Amino acid sequence: MQKQRVLTGITTTGTPHLGNYVGAIRPAIAASQSADIDSYLFLADYHALIKCQDPQHVHQSTREIAATWLALGLDPQKTHFYRQSDVPQIPELMWVLTCLTAKGLMNRAHAYKAAVQANEEAGEDPDFGVTMGLYSYPVLMAADILMFNAHKVPVGKDQIQHVEMARDIAQRFNHHFGEVFTLPEAVVDDVAVLSGLDGRKMSKSYGNTIPLFDTPKKLQKSINKIKTNLLEPGDPKDPDDSVVFEFWQAFANEEQVAYMREQYASGIAWGQAKKELFALIDEELAPARERYNELMQDIGYIENQLQLGAERARDEASVTIEKVRRAVGIHKMI
Ligand code: TRP
């Protein structure tokens, strides 16, 4: 039986935070170790340009994200680990897909609609500040996915629509030009959305994140800032209404979860709960943090791994793009 191909991309803007770790990185690395899947994980640096025009930032973030995944145990022998921009067949495929994607479909994309709505509310022209990159974002994402004939695409809720669009586009291509693409499916793991310091979803855009590989001291400081209520030491506390407990659950085993529930019931002080939380998180992250710091000093190694991944990805991509070109009538005369 053919292995399930699971593919996901990470946009290279920003520094990985605990929310990324719990919600995406940790499960993806665990999944990539499974013998019955074929995993593709790539740095979506062309996607980064849509949100960010600061070259230094895009470059630094690419480095940090690559080092993070490698430090956390991603095995580039088992996973296709590559940079989107190292596979020129992806933007090439994007153009072909662009030519058969209905403009009306793109008009319905959430990210574009949100930008238009914000403009309308501000009394601006509806398309103020909207680039063709933002508008065509889902087509580039479709090219990422269809290029490797992914079956499953693990994403956050905000990306489901994009995967569905990729599926629509694939269907349209196959219908028109013959079966070339696998129809992808979004997989959403909805247990693991971590709150941020202020209780809203942890996200760079809310400024409420805890960077994954901060020094232990900074990690402790951030944990101390997690929002709590005014209950005093000795007052019983509700674990299910506590961001500190939510973090605890994200890192603890079953036994530790039961232990902390008891502590809440018997009125653990917030300071103490945070102290124990820091120790728990630090224990899980410390070895990877050390490797991360080493890797950030050894960029040659990271680049090398990415190059190896890119070669394998290009080998596959060149087969698919050849099929695509033939299908649409672009190929040599003889
Ligand atoms: N757009 C995705 C995000 O912002 C990242 C991404 C780019 C992606 N290409 C992809 C995810 C292909 C899955 C598949 O999270």
Image (spheres, rainbow, N blue to C red):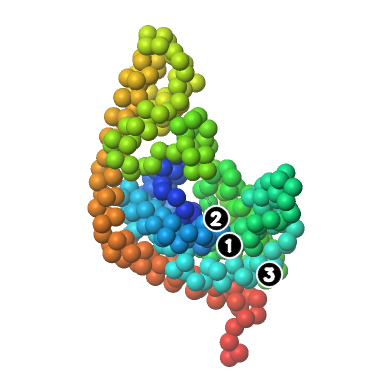
Q: Is residue 144 above or below residue 93?
A: above
Residue holding disc 3: 99
Of the image marks 3 and 2, the number of the one nearer the N terminus: 2
Q: Residues within 10 Å of mark 3 (few under 14, many from 20)?
A: few
* Badge 2 amino acid: Lys
Of the image marks 1 and 2, the number of the one nearer the N terminus: 2
- Classify mark 1 as within 8 Å of ligand 1 or not, answering yes or no: yes
**Picture coordinates of residue 131 (x, y %)?**
63, 61
Residue holding disc 1: 140
- Can the viewer see residue 29? yes
Residue holding disc 2: 51
Of 244 and 149, the residue lying toward us: 244
Residue in the image at 62% along x and 58% along y: 134
Of 93 and 312, the residue lying toward us: 93
* Badge 1 amino acid: Leu
Q: Residue furthest front?
A: 123
- Classify mark 2 as within 8 Å of ligand 1 or not, answering yes or no: no
Q: Is residue 42 above or below residue 180?
A: above
